């Protein structure tokens, strides 16, 4: 899932909790069974917090790292990994603030109302998936790459499960 989708989901939940997002009518079917958004398969839980924007940019940067290091010798894979890890929460914050502004809300909801869980979960997901990237900073052997991929899958699944505990319920 992208940071844009995470931010959109959070803003929509906030609007619904304030009563702005309720549908005009409801049927008796609404009370029967779980909501469609609550029904998730293993694949959607796996990619729920993976920040597609930063992973994509990171992959492109790591792929072009040999050329980049020729131009900037101080640049290395670890530095790129750290920069993108730090960029993930910053990018989420910018997207979230923009979504709130577009919804007619203030950009900053306050420390207590800030969506800490999606921001932290997306950063942890990036840290895990960044290890699974070919030619990444830590996986230099075939077994290291396999281990990095398994860690990424495990962490993503765990984040999807933990998200059920840290995501506020909507009214």
Image (cartoon, helix red, strand yellow):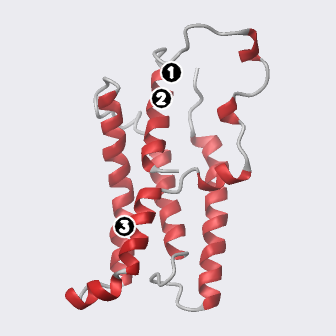
Please give the count of numbered marks on the rendered protein: 3
The residue drawn where x is 36% and y is 74% is 61
Q: Is residue 9 above or below residue 120?
A: above
The residue drawn where x is 47% and y is 50% is 2
- In this rendering, position of residue 92 left or right of residue 122: left
Q: Are dots 2 and 3 in contact, CB under 8 Å?
A: no
Disc 1 residue crowd, few under 14, some 14–19, many 20+, Cα 10 Å: some
The quarter of the picture where the C terminus appears is top right
According to the image, label 2 marks what residue? 12
Task: From the top left corner, tell me how far across and down residue 4 is, in percent.
Answer: 42, 45
Task: From the top left corner, tell me how far across and down residue 65 is, in percent.
Answer: 34, 83
Q: Quadrant of residue 164?
A: top right
Disc 1 and disc 3: Cα gap in Å?
32 Å
Disc 2 residue crowd, few under 14, some 14–19, many 20+, Cα 10 Å: some
According to the image, label 3 marks what residue? 84
Disc 2 and disc 3: Cα gap in Å?
27 Å
Disc 3 residue crowd, few under 14, some 14–19, many 20+, Cα 10 Å: many
Disc 2 and disc 1: Cα gap in Å?
6 Å
- In this rendering, position of residue 95 left or right of residue 7: left
Relative depth, front residue between 7 and 56: 56
One can see residue 132 in this view: yes
Task: From the top left corner, tell me how far across and down residue 28 is, in percent.
Answer: 75, 10
Task: From the top left corner, tell me how far across and down residue 131 is, in percent.
Answer: 52, 75
According to the image, label 1 marks what residue? 16
| Mark with earlier residue (2, 3) | 2
């Amino acid at each position: 899932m992208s940071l844009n989708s995470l931010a959109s989901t959070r803003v929509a939940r906030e609007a619904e909790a304030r009563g702005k997002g309720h549908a005009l009518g409801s049927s008796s079917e609404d009370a029967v069974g779980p909501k469609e958004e609550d029904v998730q398969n293993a694949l959607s839980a796996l990619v729920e917090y993976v920040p597609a924007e930063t992973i994509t940019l990171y992959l492109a940067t790591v792929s072009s790292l040999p050329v980049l290091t020729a131009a900037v010798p101080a640049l290395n894979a670890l530095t790129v990994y750290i920069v993108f890890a730090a960029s993930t929460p910053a990018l989420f914050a910018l997207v979230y603030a923009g979504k709130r502004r577009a919804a007619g809300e203030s950009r900053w909801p306050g420390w207590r109302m800030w969506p800490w869980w999606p921001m932290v979960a997306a950063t942890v997901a990036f840290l895990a998936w960044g290890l699974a990237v070919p030619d990444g900073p830590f996986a230099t052997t075939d077994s290291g790459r396999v281990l990095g991929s398994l860690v990424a899958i495990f962490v993503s699944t765990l984040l999807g499960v933990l998200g059920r505990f840290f995501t506020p319920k909507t009214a």
